Every structure is written in structure tokens, then in C-alpha cells.
Image: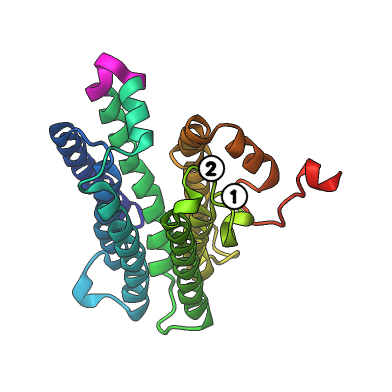
Amino acid sequence: MLWTPVTAVLGLMAMVMAAAWAYGLAIKNGGWTDVFWSFGSGLALIIAALWPAPDAASARQWLVAALAVAWAIRLGLYLGPRVAGHPEDARYAHFRELFGKSYALGMLGVAMAQAPATALLAVSVAVAAQRPLDHLDLRDLAGVLIVVAALWGEALADRQMRRFKADPANQGRVCDIGLWAWSRHPNYFFEWIGWLAYPAIGLDPLRPMTWLSLSAPVVMYLLLTRVSGIPPLEEAMLRSRGPAYRAYQARVSSFFPRRPKVPVEAEA
């Protein structure tokens, strides 16, 4: 029963990302790929949570669906205004340079690779939603608290970054205040934290299938730290900030928050 909704999610997201690719090409802004993925994934994860029949869904299924919706709305509403009416995001501008004359084909690959990523996220969501207990319990509450903490952390990191950029005195500088003094990407860290809600709800060590609930945090960790999150963003920051960002890299953790290292000159 688990694989049927996951397959449905994969099919839906293939169509969503094909539309994202076509729209991005039409308006010459690949950043819309992220917006389509956010809202499309939200819809797809609702399907995974409420499968097979929304009208017969349990309280847990509705709860898990609500958590997925909260994530999708926050991310989509954050990304949408950043893309609409603004220059193309540095990551996608870099793809334009990297792919050259093969840009359309290369971007198709970038967009379509995000469909199976959502399908893997859907595995965690479906496992959590289908936990065989007919009432909500403390594990469900733990899942809710994890998502709330993640959304709060992301909002705080975003607010601190906006405040930093709004100060003219910080033009050209690297943001290293608040959460950004403890992690170079606190927004990504809290994004990852939110996906721990699904194993918190659905993982049962005595039921081997439920270990698949760990797929979402594993996939998101790899995406954020190895693929489409930190690597291209740090490349762009190094191009724009140079030595200042290298010093920031040497001082501050990439992902997991920890006390910043003391600069060598400060030790002397």
C-alpha cells in the first residue's frame, strides 16, 4: 500500500517539474523551478498522507498532511517573492553559464531530478500517516513541536538576514549575526530539522518497514549539504565576497550550529 501513493507522487511531480521547466524557459528565469517544486511537493505530500481516500482519512493522516502543507506554504511564500520580478538566482544563472547552448536540456535534467526527490520525501510522510494507532498520542505531538520549532528557526534566520541586508553599512559584507554566527546556513539546518517530524511520528524499531520514515531527513540532508543547497550557494558567495567569505567559512560551521571558532588574528 505504501508504494502506490509514492508512485502517484512521482507521476504528479514529473508533470509539475516539466511545467516548471517550460515556464522557466519561457520567462528566462530558472528560479521558478524552486517555487513550482515547493507548492507541487506540498500537493503531492497531501496525496501521500491522505491515501487512499481523504473522506476516510484518520486524524493522524490529516495531521501529517497539515504538517506537509505548513512546510510547503512557508517555503513557497518565501521563495515566490524572491523570484517574481527579480534577477535570476545566482545558482540558476550559473547553470545558464555552465550548460551554454545545452541550457534547455540541462535545465530539464535539473528540474526533473526533483520529482524523485519528492517521491522519497513522500515515503516518510506515508509511513508516518499510516502508523496503525487509532488515536493521536505524544509522538504525534512531538512531530508537531518539531515542525513548529523548524518553522520558527527558519523564520528567525530569514528575519536576521533581512535586517542585516537592510542596513546600508553592511553592503558587501557577510552576514555573521545571530544564528548566522553559529551556522553559515541556519535556514537550511532548520529546514532539515522539520523533516525529522515524520520518523518521530512513524518510526517503530520493531516494524522494519517504518525505518523508511528516515528517508526524508536523509534525502533532505544530502540535497541541502551535497547537491542543490550549500555547494552552489557557497560557490556564488565566494565569487561575490571572496576572502571575506573564505574567512567566514573558516570560522563558522557549514550546517550544524556550533560555537564559532576564534579568528587567528584575535587569538594573537
Residue 97: x percent and y percent?
A: 34, 21
User: Quarter-wise, where is residue 247 in the image?
Assistant: top right
Task: Write down the residue under mark 1.
Answer: 255
Task: Write down the residue under mark 2.
Answer: 225
Name the residue at the left extreme: 26
Name the residue at the top extreme: 101
| Predominant SS of the magenta segment | helix
Front residue of this view, candidates 248 and 168 = 168
Residue at image location 20% in from the left, 41% down from the top: 20
Residue 37: x percent and y percent?
A: 28, 48
Residue 212 seen: no
Q: Is residue 122 magenta?
A: no
Residue at image location 38% in from the left, 68% down from the top: 129
Residue 18 seen: yes
Front residue of this view, candidates 119 and 164 = 164
Bounds of the magenta segment? 98-105
Residue at image location 35% in from the left, 48% down from the top: 119
Mark 2–mark 1 contact, CB under 8 Å? yes
Name the residue at the front extreme: 169
Query: Three-letter amino acid code at disc 2?
Result: Thr
- Which mark, residue 135? none
* Within-10-Å neighbours for mark 2: few <14, some 14–19, many 20+: some
